[in-house]
Amino acid sequence: MNHERTKRMYYFIYCKGPNEKRFTLCNPWKGTRGMGKVYAPRFLKDQADHAVAWMTEHNPGFIFQRRPAR
């Protein structure tokens, strides 16, 4: 039988502070920033959207983005 595999798309969360020029990877659950892709958590789209919305609400002045994990 042929089974179609469902490919899941994973996302990273990037953040930028008020006086920063570049976005860096961040871990919203530990509150850390600037790690490499190997150490950054991966999220499904709905999880990433929820995390970005929550972090935007609780961290004024910061910008958060969901980007595909590549």
Image (tube, rainbow, N blue to C red):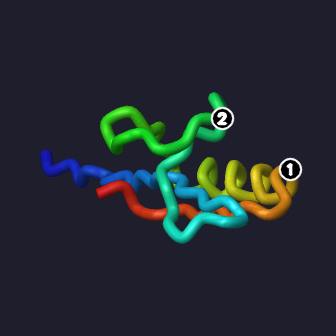
At a point 58% along the width and 35% down the height, the residue shown is: 32
Residue beneath disc 2:
31
Residue projecting furthest to the front: 19
- Disc 1 target residue: 58
Give neighbour class at mark 1: few <14, some 14-19, many 20+ (Cα, 10 Å).
few
In the image, 58 versus 33, the foreground residue is 33
- The residue lying toward the viewer, choosing from 50 and 57, is 57
The C terminus is located in which quarter?
A: bottom left
As measured in the structure, the alpha-carbon distance from the residue carrying label 2 to the one carrying label 1 is 12 Å
- Secondary structure beneath dot 1 equals helix
Task: Give the amino acid type for the residue marked by disc 1 in the picture.
Answer: His
Mark 2, Cα crowd under 10 Å, few <14 / some 14-19 / many 20+, is: few
**Which numbered disc, 2 or 1, marks the residue that appears first in the sequence?**
2
Question: At x 64% / y 40%, what residue is drawn?
Answer: 28
Q: Position of residue 8 (x, y in %)?
A: 38, 52
Residue 45 lies, with reference to residue 35, above or below; the image says below
Q: How many marks?
A: 2
Secondary structure state at the residue bearing disc 2: loop
User: Which quadrant is the N terminus positioned in?
Assistant: top left
Instruction: Estimate the x, y position of residue 62 in percent, counting from the top left.
Output: 73, 61
Q: Three-letter amino acid code at disc 2?
A: Gly
Residue 39: image quadrant is: top left
Q: Nearer the viewer, residue 43 or 12?
A: 12
